[in-house]
Image (tube, grey):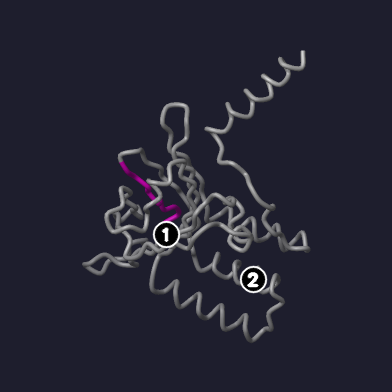
Amino acid sequence: MRRLLLAVVLLGVFGGCANAPPFVGEPAPTLDNPKEEAAYLAALDRYSDRKEIYDGFDTRVFAGATLQSPAFRAARVRRRALFQVLPAAKVEALLAEEQAEAAKFHEFFLGVHVNDMRYDDFANRNSIWRLALVTPAGEVTPVEVRRIGRADLNVRAYYPYTTLFWVGYRVRFPRTFTEGQPVIPEGTEQVTLRVASSLGQAELKVHAR
């Protein structure tokens, strides 16, 4: 009976490991104030999406992305201010910096868990992955993809859909096409971050405003 029970437990463990990334490490930090925590998670949910790329029944890549919209940047700064107990002057300076960055680029935080580390090359010049921001006006490719590194506790405090085995990237797109038209036109409700390679593709859809 014990052997049968052990077999069932092992089947559940190993049968599920291909469909969910392993969770290792401490849970993501949260704010003490439940209302502040809920407000941040609502902003995170509005500007984030998660998708998987499959190989049959197994998952090759888990991906999550968050659009760094002006509203989300403000929410992230407020969260940092509460965690670090920042003075008002510092908060105002951070908000100004974030809004200046938002005026230069359409930026995403991209978190990935790749089952085979050979394919975690998103920041490489000759990466197998093509990233694109898709909007009603067309699509553009990044002007910058920078590897942030492993999703440590500080990263997970802001992007709790990641865990220890995930890697974070900063992905920046131009705000205008070469002809000068805005990449995200006024009134756009939703945009897509497309992640594609010979291994498969995922389209992460988030609110634009």
Residue at the spot 60% in from the left edge and 61% down from the top edge: 158
Find out whether residue 193 is within the magenta segment.
Answer: yes
Q: Is the magenta stretch mostly helix, strand or loop?
A: strand
Q: Measure how far apart labels 2 and 1 are at the Cα level.
A: 30 Å
Q: Mark 1 points at which residue?
A: 187
Residue at the spot 33% in from the left edge and 57% down from the top edge: 124
Q: Name the residue under label 2.
A: 80
Name, please, the residue furthest toward the bottom.
Answer: 89
Q: Position of residue 128 (x, y in %)?
A: 30, 48
Residue at the spot 48% in from the left edge and 59% down from the top edge: 109
* Stretch in magenta: 187-197
Q: In which quarter of the image is residue 185?
A: bottom left
Sooner in the amino-acid sequence: mark 2 or mark 1: 2
Number of numbered discs overlaid on the protein picture: 2
Q: Helix, strand, or loop for circle 1?
A: loop
Amino acid type, residue under disc 2 in the picture:
Arg
Q: Where is residue 209 in the image (x, y as percent from the top left)?
A: 49, 61
The answer to whether residue 16 is left or right of residue 87 is left
The answer to whether residue 24 is left or right of residue 129 is right
Q: In this view, does 22 lie above or below 111?
A: above
Q: Quadrant of residue 31?
A: bottom right
Q: Is residue 116 above or below residue 173?
A: above
Residue at the spot 41% in from the left edge and 53% down from the top edge: 191
**Numbered disc in front, either 2 or 1:** 2
Find out whether residue 106 is within the magenta segment.
Answer: no
Q: Position of residue 120 (x, y in %)?
A: 40, 50
Amino acid type, residue under disc 1 in the picture:
Gly
Q: Residue 110 bears which disc, if any?
A: none
